[in-house]
Image (tube, rainbow, N blue to C red):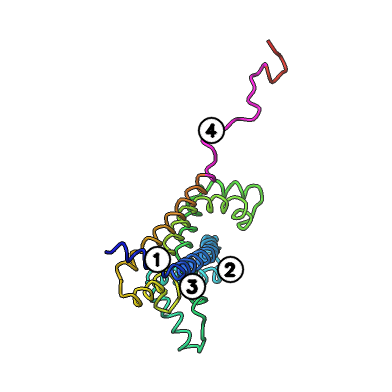
Amino acid sequence: MSFEWVVKIVLENWPMFLRGAGMTLFIALIGTIFGAIIGLLAGVIRTIPVPERGAKKVILKIINIILSIYIEFFRGTPMIVQAMVIYYGSALAFNINMNVIVAALIVVSINTGAYMAEYVRGGIVSIDKGQYEAAQAIGMNHIQTMLNVVLPQVIRNILPATGNQFVINIKDTSVLNVISVSELYFLTKSVAGNNFRYFESFFVACVIYFVMTFIVTRILLYVEKKLEGPDNYTMIGNETPLEATGTRN
């Protein structure tokens, strides 16, 4: 590898690298946000208690089957294949000419949602059953229990997994070049094709990917630490019995 070529490639093509990195972060961030919302809804629905009989039982059973198929399919197939099916398949089967950015966001969102659904379901199942019983004892229904008792704990517990999924999405957006999304990998191929210096061009891309994931990881670790709170807590009203009664030596 020629260091001079690396410097030359960066100086001549930095706008393309910057544009590619921006598109990569945009798709990964928006896809993770919408995927987290999809996963949260799917995870909550899958944990709704199924009654023993009635129309509600049938409806929940059908919804659970659909969600299970969705989760298993998108967790069991590569994102690159999903991108081809959604973008080209929608055009051939339904005559829908989808914008590549929209298609990319849909692919990343539903793929992330499948994984997040399992994270949320696992987080809900891990909550002690005594909390559900206590909530029901004071008159809360399932929705109120989820909103006020369970989900605040689940969201905090799955934050590391959500951050990890965001980092994965930053890297996995590279497969979207198959539908001509102008993300970092796609534009790096264009740069390498212009100067025929593939190793140096992709070395620059490799460094950019590392910098992005490193910064995101450190930000997420900082947020997690803030949510954990301080290591030491000062108790309010921590007076001695004499001080509490107003007696002084």
Q: Main secondary structure of the magenta part?
A: loop
Rendering coords of residue 190 (x, y %): 38, 76
Q: Which residue is tagged 1?
A: 10
**Depth order, front residue of 116/12:** 12
**Marks 2 and 4, Cα distance to the nearest angstrom?**
48 Å
Q: Is residue 228 magenta?
A: yes
Q: Crowding near pointer 4: few (<14 within 10 Å), some, many (20+)?
A: few
Q: Which residue is tagged 3?
A: 66
Q: Which residue is tagged 2?
A: 56
Give the label, 3 or 2, closer to the camera.
Answer: 3
Rendering coords of residue 35 (x, y %): 51, 65
Q: Crowding near pointer 3: few (<14 within 10 Å), some, many (20+)?
A: few
Q: Crowding near pointer 2: few (<14 within 10 Å), some, many (20+)?
A: few
Rendering coords of residue 174 (x, y %): 40, 70
Q: Which residue is tagged 4?
A: 232
Identify the image quadrant of the C terminus: top right
Number of marks in the image? 4
Looking at the rendered structure, the kind of residue marked 3 is Ile
Does the image show residue 222?
Answer: yes
Does residue 132 sit above or below 92 in this rendering?
Answer: above
**Marks 3 and 1, Cα distance to the nearest angstrom?**
48 Å
Residue for point 43% across, 79% down: 180
**Mark 4 vs 3, N-terminal side:** 3
Do callouts 4 and 3 mark residues in contact (Cβ within 8 Å)?
Answer: no
Q: Quadrant of residue 188?
A: bottom left
Looking at the rendered structure, the kind of residue marked 4 is Asn
Q: Dot 4: what SS? A: loop
Does residue 241 sit above or below 222 in this rendering?
Answer: above
In the image, the segment drawn in magenta is 226-242
